Amino acid sequence: MLIEVCADKPLSKPYILLKRTESYVKATASLQAFCLASILLCYLNFKAIEDSEDNFFWVHLFLFIYFSSLVITTQLDAYSRYQNYKMAKDLLHQYGFKKPLIRVFSKSKCQREAAAEAGNCLGFKKEVNDYFYSMGFRWYHILPHLILKKPQIFFTKNYWLSTFFVSNYKSKYFYW
């Protein structure tokens, strides 16, 4: 919802929160699904710890800790992708569909999904998806392409900051 359209009739805070939550889930759908799967596996390993014998206790404990960490990192990544979604939505609203603006969001599948959802909200989903397709990205390109080109980048501070700790972006044009 455009901020300037609603200037004369204020929206309720619960409604805005509900719509923001809805757009958060839509923009980060695959990450949320992965998070739910990690929670399930975490729970199953926690239950297995109680029933395990000495040999398997450590295996289930390790898996429990591993899946717990995936839940946390998935939510950090989802928050960062939501910031990308808000930025992409503002850029698409302000400038329309322009390839150089969308290219910024082509680093990972989650960024591409966030940009596609922003495009969907503004009627540019086909253009955004076609552009990513023309760049060679398919549904199975999950890992960030930079990780595949230079695996050592995974250990840099800049990678971790841009993946999990993107600063809050306040939308200029939309409530959600």
Image (cartoon, rainbow, N blue to C red):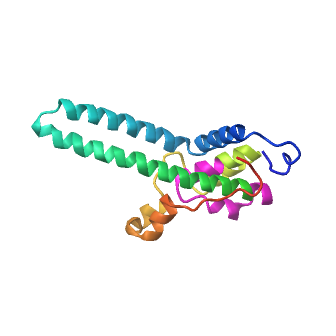
Task: Indicate yes or no whether the magenta region holds residue 132.
Answer: no
* Total marks placed: 0
Q: Nearer the viewer, residue 148 or 96?
A: 96
**Depicted 146 relative to depicted 15: above or below:** below
Q: Nearer the viewer, residue 14 or 157?
A: 14
Q: Nearer the viewer, residue 42 or 124?
A: 42
Residue 168 on image: x %, y %: 60, 59
In the rendered image, which quarter contains the N terminus?
A: top right
Q: Residue at x 42, y 61 (%)?
A: 148
Residue 99 on image: x %, y %: 70, 61
Q: Residue at x 70, y 44 (%)?
A: 120
Q: Main secondary structure of the magenta part?
A: helix
The reply, left or right, for residue 14 in relation to residue 142 is right
**Which residue occupies the extreme right position in the image?**
8
Residue 96 seen in render: no
Q: Residue at x 40, y 64 (%)?
A: 154
The reply, left or right, for residue 82 in relation to residue 158 is right
Residue 85 seen in render: yes
Q: Residue at x 89, y 46 (%)?
A: 8
Magenta segment, which residues?
92-116
The reply, left or right, for residue 72 in relation to residue 167 is left
**Depicted 136 relative to depicted 64: above or below:** below
Residue 58 on image: x %, y %: 17, 43
The reply, left or right, for residue 15 in relation to residue 21 is right
Task: Indicate yes or no whether the magenta region holds residue 95.
Answer: yes
Q: Quadrant of residue 71?
A: top left
